[in-house]
Image (cartoon, rainbow, N blue to C red):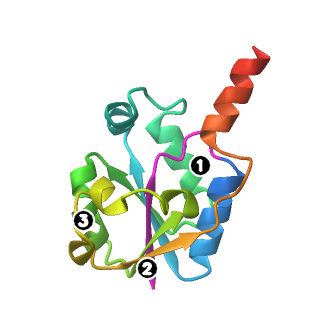
Amino acid sequence: MRIYIQGTFDLFHAGHINLLKRANELGDVVVALLTDELVERYRGKPPIISYEDRKACLESCEYVLQVGKLRELKDTKSQIRGYECDLVALGTDWAIKDIYKQYRMTEKELGPKLIFFPYTKDISSTSIKKRINELT
């Protein structure tokens, strides 16, 4: 089984590891990593860590089979199909969001089923950035 995960993975942390580990328990994990340019367009600011460094972190993770580059959100559908994924994995923090709108496709177009893994409480890139700002 092949599991698709896409994301920024900025400030690689235990929450990321938990998601990747849980997904890896089901099969081979393929990560579509957002480019710096896409992150900036999507979030309005660039990631703290460069694409190449974020990619190196993911490639060194024992739970990840392959890391691909996601340049445009509209390419999600072709990436999922290109990697021949059976499931799309997300943290439960995404369960309240319209993931189909995010991926720019309908549930039927997506194909693979969505699977949600428990969000790791008290850790996120946003919370890390906030703590850094409070300390400086």
Q: Amino acid at mark 1?
A: Cys
Label 3 sits on residue: 77
Q: Is residue 123 magenta?
A: no
Near mark 3 (Cα within 10 A), the count class, few <14, some 14-19 or many ≥20, is some
Compared to 3, does 47 lie above or below? above
Q: Quadrant of residue 108?
A: bottom left
Q: Earlier in the sequence, mark 2 or mark 3?
A: 2
Of residues 49 and 18, the one drawn nearer to the viewer in this rendering: 18
Compared to 43, does 98 lie above or below? below
Q: Amino acid at mark 3?
A: Lys
* Quadrant of the rendering where the N terminus is positioned: bottom left
Q: Position of residue 72 (x, y in %)?
A: 25, 47
Label 2 sits on residue: 2
Q: Position of residue 112 (x, y in %)?
A: 34, 79
Near mark 1 (Cα within 10 A), the count class, few <14, some 14-19 or many ≥20, is some
Q: What range is drawn magenta here?
A: 1-12
